[in-house]
Amino acid sequence: RYEELLSIMQDAVQLELMGGETLLAKNLIPLLTKLNKRIAIKITTNASQPPTDELVALLKQFKNVCITFSIDAVSPLTFKYIRTGDWFQVERSMQDWLQYKDWINFRSTVTISILNMGLLSDVFKYLDKMFGITNVGYNWVSDPDYYAVGIMPDTVKEWIDSKTTYFKAQKLLPYMWSSKHDPILWQRFLTRTHHLDNIREQPIENYLTELYNAINKNDVRHI
């Protein structure tokens, strides 16, 4: 719908671009070239792509630019398992982008699921330091519903409680407890995890070891 939308975008005050991976979209540069430069541009990216001279020169022409990095884990192993990417590449890319912080507003968003609920202290601490506390937000996975944090058994929630020390992560714990354990959805999560682990040849015990141990403790249905 690129051509169809381009005609009405000229009247926009703000344009927010999301993915897929936005910075890999083949029409990104042509779109930015044709837009009225008074439009405020917001881009969400997974941070896999560093800035290019062409893209930076185009963005520089706009009234206001905001780039939001979608980051769900901040260590090589956890990032590879959750996002199937290279954390070091992502980290380098973010640093390359931050050299333009004098005219680009940078933010970060964490998408919270069963996989990273127990990692939030480290994730928020890292991102708050890089972008500033008020520039780091979050959203909850609700679809697929078997990744929603509320469906976990109480024993896993208690483990997350015990290891969550950072103030911003602690504030999110009540939401985790606001829903009761759902055995059917929990089993779907375990089955799906086992299936993906086999396909990718990435067993969860090698990447999210603490979560794996919490799941398998006290006869909580084994992966």
Image: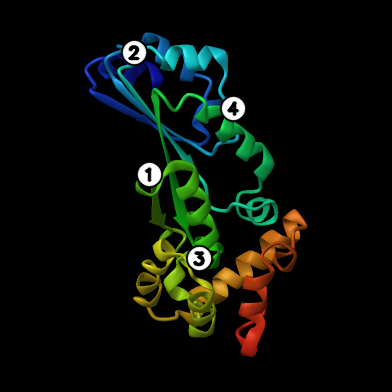
Q: CA distance from mark 3 to mark 1?
A: 20 Å
| Residue 106: % across, % down | 42, 35
Q: Earlier in the sequence, mark 2 or mark 3?
A: 2
Residue 61 percent coordinates (x, y): 37, 12
Q: Which residue is mark 4?
A: 50
Q: Which mark is residue 135?
A: 1
Callout 2: 10 Å neighbours few (<14), some, many (20+)?
Answer: some
User: Does label 4 or label 1 sit earlier along the sequence?
Assistant: 4
Callout 2 amino acid = Leu
Tag 1, which secondary structure? helix
Kindly identify which residue carries mark 2: 35
- Residue type marked 3: Met
* Label 4 or label 2, whichever comes before in sequence order: 2
**Three-letter code, disc 4:** Pro
Q: In this figure, which residue is indicated by the disc labeled 3?
A: 117
Q: Position of residue 4 (x, y in %)?
A: 33, 18
The alpha-carbon separation of the residues under discs 1 and 2 comes to: 27 Å
What is the C-alpha distance between the residues marked 3 and 4?
28 Å
Q: Nearer the viewer, residue 113 or 201?
A: 113
| Tag 3–tag 1 contact (CB < 8 Å) | no
Q: Is residue 120 above or below residue 103?
A: below
- Left or right of 213 in this view: 29: left
Which is nearer the N-term, disc 1 or disc 2? 2
Q: Identify the residue shown where x is 52% and y is 47%.
A: 71
* Nearer-N-terminus badge (3/4): 4
| Lower position in the chain sequence, tag 3 or tag 1 | 3
Q: Residues within 10 Å of mark 4 (few under 14, many from 20)?
A: some
